Amino acid sequence: MNSRRRVHLGAVMAAGAAVLLLILLWSVIDRPARAAAGNAEDYASPLELLFSPDGTRLYVLCNQSNEVRVLDAASYSLIKTVAVGRAPRGFSLSPDGTRLFVTNSWDDTLSIIDTQTLAVVATWPVGAEPSSVVEDRGGTRLFVANRISGDVAVLAAQTGEEEKRLLAGRGASYITPSPDGSKLYVTHVYPNPHAHTTQQGNRLTPESEITVIDTARAVVVERIPLPRIAGVFHTAFSADGRLGVVAEVHPKNLVPLAHVEHGWALANTLTVFGADVGRPVEVPLDELERYASNPFDVVIAPDKSHIYVTHGGSEIVTVVDVQRLLHFIHTHPGSFAQDLSASANYVVARIPVGHNPRGAALTRDGSKLFVANRLEDTISVIDTRANRVASTITLEGPKTLSAVRRGEQTFYTARYSFQGHYGCASCHIDSTFDGLTWDLEPDGFGRDIVDNRNLEDIKDTEPYKWNGGNPNIPMECGPRTEKYFWRSENYDNLTLAALSTYVRSLPARPNRWRQASGELTAAQERGKAIFERGKDKFGNPIAVANRCSYCHSGPKGTSQKSFDVGTLKATDHASPLDTPQLTNIVLAPPYLHDGSARTLEEIWTVFNPNDKHGRTNDLTKDELNDLIEYLRTR
């Protein structure tokens, strides 16, 4: 055996031994961690912050403990804890400050809290995965953004009765009123679907929007385009209403990830709009070797001197000088969203805070900025004159970290990637997906394009990757991630074991298409019969290996085997494809390995001409609809 081959085999054996050790560690750590995962509500996980109108109280929305904690804004002592529904994601006060509205995203409900008694006085059903809520100035209507249905529900403010739905962007999540309350600005976390199909896959630039609603008429009056943007979060306005700013992510998913060292993977930006700029302008927050990963909340100082942006991945708050920003915009009319030197002209500070900073709130005089560190159960109090953390509020809860919690911190941070460019959560928003396709491997432009699959409930669905190349989660999250994403080997064994445990712990969100009784509707029953059928409509037998129920078998809808279903493109390396699980499949378009199918229906009407992906060419439109209705329940 020559020396080169001995070295190669030695490296393979060493890597295999390392992964084996990790699997053993992971199996040991996973047992107590799974128990800890069942008590995830013990952690507060502060997500959003809000001051009372008089500034004496600080309301803290605790996402995992399912509660609102009310703190004294001066002493930071706990006044009361108010239990709400599951996975609360957003809240707001009525204009008069007498009611606090909380969206419970996993219960599809709205909790109404009386701010005098600090008790829940009503719970109203709303749309699919409500994520934020705003009451109009007159106190007549509530507007609720629903992430799954991608719309804004308009409710009667006193009764909760739904008046109508307004179409927003895909994954509608965050609502911000204009300073005068006449308009609402709604953002969304997933890119809007494209209007047409491409046989080469979903290789088009993502498009997003800010949906503008007239509150008096409850109608959409404008859709501000956000070209090339795929994740849009909070919006803020200056007190005079002349400056609007929105936090967003600009993915560069049309080029190979080989360019990550040049900043060509994700850009973290703001879009600035309003009378002060005249036209919407995208400005970068990153700089070379110092990225600002996962911008989330944005607030503007009362005197319009500075903009503050929280960054969940980089664990910082970026401070932007408004006058310098406006000067830069007006003196640089060209596009500079990709310019990693631009931010030096207006970013004046980057303030380190805690793990996964999310919501932020300024005191009325603008002297202090409070930042919720979601994965640390703390609130950083920043002195805005000195641009430093002056104190830290520690919320009540467990002081030790479970393996799941440590893994979640690793999942959301960008510290492990090359130059802190991005983290797992940059592409798997809120531990799900981003609605994009990516060219992950350095094998040339446009080769092996892959759809980003949902992470929910992926435990025990190995192997992973579309080609089934990774046999387990430690391999998927460890060597593969370090090689292709982080460009460095920096997970120690316990870190990787904890990360793997967290990913395995991710549950599926509630399925909105299943009846509470567990019974199927008539259409779902007909679809189930098609899914499980052994003969086509003409009595011809369907080969066992070409039946839907053969490949998509088991409790999660995957046989965990690979097949050629006739969907490979000229840009793919010839290989069978892993069978994806069907858990909540309806939530995660586009479909197929390369994202070429915009909808479930297109899988069979456009991309199955030879019946290799199940026997479907004999089905009518209504029968395909029945099949899809059944798949929605998986």
Image (tube, rainbow, N blue to C red):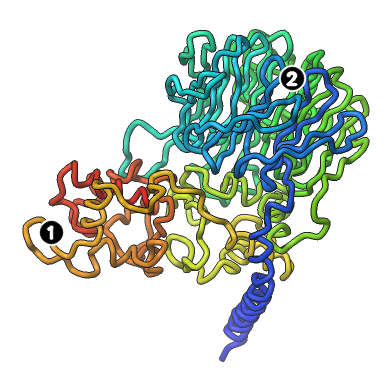
Between 540 and 206, the one nearer to me in the picture: 540
* Amino acid type shown at disc 1: Asp
Horizontal side of residue 409 vs 552, given as left or right:
right
Q: Where is residue 153 in the image (x, y as percent from the top left)?
A: 48, 25
1 or 2: tag closer to the N-terminus: 2
Q: Which quarter of the image is occupied by the C terminus?
A: bottom left
Disc number placed over residue 325 in the picture, else none: 2
Viewer-closest of 459 and 594: 459
In this rendering, the label closer to the viewer, 1 or 2: 1
The image quadrant of residue 562 is bottom left
Residue 461 drawn above or below residue 25: above
Looking at the picture, which amino acid does disc 2 mark? Answer: Leu
Closer to us: 566 or 263: 566
Q: Position of residue 572 (x, y in %)?
A: 37, 56
Q: Is mark 1 on a helix, strand or loop?
A: loop
Relative vertical location of residue 35 with respect to residue 537 in this rendering, above or below: below
Left or right of 80? Residue 531 is: left
Image location (x, y in percent) of residue 581:
41, 59
**SS label for mark 2:** helix
- Neighbours of disc 1 within 10 Å: few (<14), some (14-19), many (20+): some
Residue 536: quadrant of the picture: bottom left
Distance from Cα at disc 1 to Cα at disc 2: 64 Å
**Above or below 578: residue 631:** above
Q: Nearer the viewer, residue 616 or 402?
A: 402
Q: Can residue 282 be seen in this view?
A: yes
Identify residue for label 1: 536
